[in-house]
Amino acid sequence: MLVKGSGSVTKYLFDNLKHLETFKYDSSTAIVTDIDGTISEIAPTPTEALVTDPMREELVKLHRKFSLVAVVSGRSVLNAREMVDVDGLLYVGNHGMEFLENGKISLYPEVEKYLPQMKQAGQKLQKGDLSHIDGLLFEDKGICFSVHYRLASQSENVRGKILHNIKNDPDCEKLKISEGRQLVELKPPLSCDKGTILENIIQEYNLKKIIYLGDDITDLDAFKRLKVLENQGELRGAGVLVCSSEIPHDVKKGSSYYVNGVDEVLKFFQWLSN
């Protein structure tokens, strides 16, 4: 089976493992992965999602075998750390705007000055017209603010109402609006995404071989950046898409390989760590 995009073909990973042996047998390889929908099944609410013990055990093995294992998530960095619960990893939260390593949190440049505006905008959204829509879940992540509509009826109509409300709110003016799997998110207006953060990690740790795994539109920037760096001869990279029915078409054509769900991510990790 192939996932076809415009001018590209994403290959099924388990039919192409021989091409990934260069990563498996090199201890300098780095593994960078998203959480929700990648190493954890998507749940009705963020608090219900979990990383299973078998997945956690494989992350420990990968950490022992390879030069770096990093978790890059839209969750707050402390929430990501608590959820994954594996020592020694690099944790990156809020789409790259905060880092946790060796117990120390650091913020992306210029984030701090937007925190008061983010707090005010989030509180207003939570108390405004959107508060009357059944099934919405508001998530204050400190740096970013998300409105989840997975549990709302007529979700596409609700999505439109959320976007309309945000775009017409003066407190949200100049903030960045993005979307994920059944959510709309407000962010500080900074040029920070998973692609820029991935490149920063590559440069900081002098990485030459890297596998990136993700499942959402926010991971497309990382897939694209990895391909650019590989085409420039900077490194060897493999972008792995975790397929689901919710994935936009653009994400499907951005990666090199795909797997079918979180269970196959676990299977891939077991192959890598063996």
Image (cartoon, grey):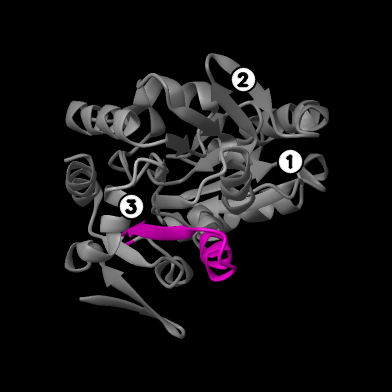
Q: Which residue is mark 3?
A: 23
* Residue drawn at 28 percent across, 27 percent down: 60
* Residue drawn at 66 percent across, 43 percent down: 186
Horizontal side of residue 58 vs 170, given as left or right: left
* Residue drawn at 67 percent across, 51 percent down: 177
Q: Which residue is mark 1?
A: 188
Q: From this viewpoint, which residue is outermost toward the bottom? A: 7
Q: Earlier in the sequence, mark 2 or mark 3?
A: 3
Instruction: Tell me which amino acid carries mark 2.
Output: Ile
The crowd level at tag 2 (other Cα within 10 Å; few <14, some 14-19, many 20+) is: few
Horizontal side of residue 23 vs 79, given as left or right: left
Q: Residue 125 location, x and y as percent?
A: 66, 36
The crowd level at tag 1 (other Cα within 10 Å; few <14, some 14-19, many 20+) is: many
Q: Residue 50 location, x and y as percent?
A: 29, 30
Instruction: Tell me which amino acid carries mark 3.
Output: Phe
Q: Which residue is mark 2?
A: 105
Horizontal side of residue 165 vs 147, given as left or right: right
The crowd level at tag 3 (other Cα within 10 Å; few <14, some 14-19, many 20+) is: many
Span of residues in magenta: 224-245
Q: Earlier in the sequence, mark 2 or mark 1?
A: 2
